[in-house]
Structures are given as structure tokens and as C-alpha cells.
Image (spheres, rainbow, N blue to C red):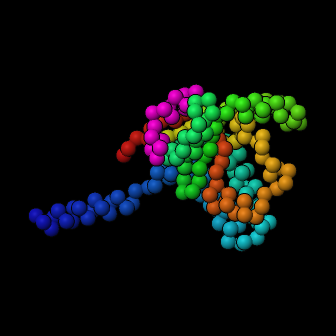
């Protein structure tokens, strides 16, 4: 009897070792993370500032190509501010996170700045939809969630980004490749179902 319980207990322990990590459950999310890693690793290993800069551009282009995403897994890391001025950070993979915020003053300033821009006249949406804000009230920090949204520009995100004028330093590029953080619009959030 004792040997049987040890054998069964060992089988359960080993069975848990072969579970997929939570960030690999969605095939599109897994592919995005693998592509990011494929771009970043050679650039970081090269220690060449020009390759680092190119890898950052490729990573941002990859996020832009990803566009809309659904049913991605994440871990809610931070909620800052209040309902009118909220910023959140969600880990979507090992050292990869999404950042979304609603700051209506910043969004209005961004809309005014875009009036003088030669880019598209359509204003960007806020970073968090009303249903997402309502759902955030029910979560704890560190909780695993399922999210849907869109990678890319949100209202006010580019307003104070002076790197477009002056460029980023080698250290900034290296840090981004090691711990990428992307701006995204979050449309829906739900608690992840435990398996």
C-alpha cells in the first residue's frame, strides 16, 4: 500500500511538470512571444547598437501587425490612479507586458496635438473600455486574467514621446528588448478559468 501511494504521488508530481505555461495556451499569443524572442535574442547577443535599434523597430512593427487580440492570458500586475485617471500593467509572458491607461486630460491634449499633425485626423480611443474598467473592480493584483483588445496607439500615448525627435539611447533599446512593454487598448477582461 505504501509503495503504491508513493508511485501514484510521483506520477501526479511529474504530470504537473509537463503542463503548458499559461502564456502558451493561446496560439497567437505564443507565436507573438516567440517572434519577439527571435528578434531580441540575436540583437542582444550582438551588443551592436545598430542591431539593437533595428530590433526595437521590428518588435514595435510586430506589435502593430498583431493588431487585435482575443482570449490572451495575462497576470494583472498594477492598477494605478482612479476611475478617471487609471493606468494598468498586465504581464502577457515572461518579462513582456501590456500597458493601458485612461487619462482624459492627456487624451484631450493628444487630440489637440493631433489637429496640427499631418497624420490621420481620427483620434485614438482610450486605453480601457468601460466594460474593462468595470471588470477591473472585481480583480486582485497578481490574478490571472483573460483579455481582449488591440495593440497600438491609444489616446495620449504619443504626446510626450520625445524619442521620435531625439532617438533612444543604446541602454533604452537594450532595456526594451529585455523587458518589452507595449501600449494596448483593453476592450474586455475576465477571470481566467482554473484547470
Image point (33%, 60%), residue name = 15
Report the residue that reaches farthest toward the left. 1
Q: Residue at x 73, y 50 (%)?
A: 61
Above or below, comparing residue 147 to residue 171 in the picture: above
Relative to 182, residue 138 above or below: above
- Whether 141 is drawn above or below 42: the answer is above
54 or 79, which is in the foreground?
A: 79
Q: Measured from the top left, where is residue 24 in percent x and y? A: 50, 52
Marks counted in the figure total 0
Residue 123 is situated, as x and y percent measured from the top left of the image, at 76, 30
1, 99: nearer the viewer: 99
In the rendered image, which quarter contains the N terminus? bottom left
Q: Position of residue 63 (x, y in %)?
A: 68, 48
Q: Is residue 168 visible?
A: yes
Which residue lies at the image location 78% right of the left edge and 46% below the top edge? Answer: 161
Residue 44's x, y, as percent? 68, 68
Magenta part of the chain: 129-145
Q: Is residue 157 magenta?
A: no
- Answer with left or right where residue 48 lies relative to residue 99: right
- Outermost residue toward the front in this view: 81
Q: Residue furthest bottom?
A: 46
Q: Residue, x 81% and y 49% (percent of image)? A: 162
Instruction: Tell me if residue 186 can be seen.
Output: no
Taking the magenta stretch, the answer to whether it contains residue 139 is yes
Residue closest to the eye, 87 or 75: 87
Amino acid at each position: 500500500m505504501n509503495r503504491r501511494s508513493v508511485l501514484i504521488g510521483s506520477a501526479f508530481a511529474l504530470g504537473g511538470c509537463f503542463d503548458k505555461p499559461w502564456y502558451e495556451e493561446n496560439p497567437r499569443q505564443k507565436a507573438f512571444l516567440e517572434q519577439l524572442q527571435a528578434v531580441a535574442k540575436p540583437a542582444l547577443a550582438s551588443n551592436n547598437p545598430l542591431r539593437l535599434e533595428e530590433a526595437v523597430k521590428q518588435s514595435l512593427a510586430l506589435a502593430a501587425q498583431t493588431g487585435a487580440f482575443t482570449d490572451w492570458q495575462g497576470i494583472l500586475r498594477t492598477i494605478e490612479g482612479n476611475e478617471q485617471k487609471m493606468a494598468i500593467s498586465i504581464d502577457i509572458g515572461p518579462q513582456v507586458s501590456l500597458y493601458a491607461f485612461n487619462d482624459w486630460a492627456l487624451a484631450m491634449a493628444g487630440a489637440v496635438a493631433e489637429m496640427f499633425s499631418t497624420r490621420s485626423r481620427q483620434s485614438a480611443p482610450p486605453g480601457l473600455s468601460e466594460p474593462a474598467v468595470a471588470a477591473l473592480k472585481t480583480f486582485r493584483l497578481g490574478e490571472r486574467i483573460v483579455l481582449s483588445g488591440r495593440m497600438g496607439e491609444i489616446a495620449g500615448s504619443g504626446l510626450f514621446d520625445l524619442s521620435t525627435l531625439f532617438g533612444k539611447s543604446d541602454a533604452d533599446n537594450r532595456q526594451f528588448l529585455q523587458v518589452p512593454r507595449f501600449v494596448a487598448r483593453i476592450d474586455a477582461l475576465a477571470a481566467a478559468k482554473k484547470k
